[in-house]
Amino acid sequence: FRPVESDDDQPLELVSVLTFASWDRFKKWLDRFALKEGFDHKIRTSKKEQGILRRVAYECTKSGSHNPQITSDPIKRHNAFSSRVLCSWKLNVTCPKKNGVVKINSFNNHHNHSLTPIIHEIAPRFRKLTPKMLEDIE
């Protein structure tokens, strides 16, 4: 298998045969994939060996469940809302020592919640100042 030179060459489909020449290219691809699908992701775990990133497990930002901090003081209580809904989407990626190629190992591409077509407006990861906005600031 040969790593691609450009993340634009990769289809925006989650398949286990995808490889990337670097972590940066993989991260760009993952952001584009999440934007297309309509969800946000976060790193659940990562492992480095001798300062080199070797393994990362990603999950949907809606994974897990909310654990409220309950207090007996009614003045300190408030109605809280959590977006966590035990979503099972996950993605495991590695970069083995032998070839240094970033590879998708396994994934669960199922969400138990509706996806958000306007995720680019909601998730901080995707909000960017446009060139026109930067021009107006100057």
Image (tube, helix red, strand yellow):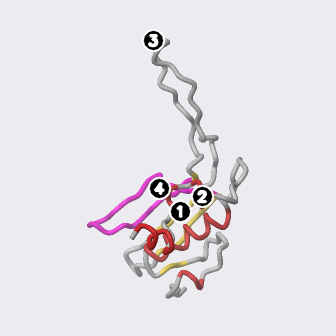
Q: CA distance from mark 2 to mark 3?
A: 37 Å
Magenta residues span 39-59
Are dots 1 and 2 in contact, CB under 8 Å? yes
Q: Nearer the viewer, mark 1 or mark 2?
A: 2
Are dots 4 and 2 in contact, CB under 8 Å? no
* x then y, percent, for residue 76: 45, 18
Decide: few, some or many residues near mark 2? Use Cα within 10 Å; few <14, some 14-19, many ≥20. few
Q: Is residue 77 left or right of residue 34?
A: left
Are dots 1 and 3 in contact, CB under 8 Å? no
Sequence-earlier tag: 2 or 3: 3
Residue 53: assigned label: none
In magenta stretch: residue 97: no
Q: Amino acid at mark 3?
A: Asp
Q: Read off the residue under disc 2.
A: 121
Circle 3 SS class:
loop
Q: CA distance from mark 1 to mark 2?
A: 7 Å
Image quadrant occupied by the C terminus: bottom left
Sequence-earlier tag: 1 or 2: 2
Residue closer to the observer: 12 or 133: 133
Circle 2 SS class:
helix
Are dots 3 and 4 in contact, CB under 8 Å? no
Above or below residue 24? Residue 48 is above
Residue at coordinates 34% horizontally, 62% vertically from top-left? 48
Residue 73: assigned label: 3
Sequence-earlier tag: 1 or 4: 4
Magenta-highlighted stretch: main secondary structure?
A: strand
Above or below residue 66? Residue 62 is below
Q: Is residue 118 left or right of residue 7?
A: right
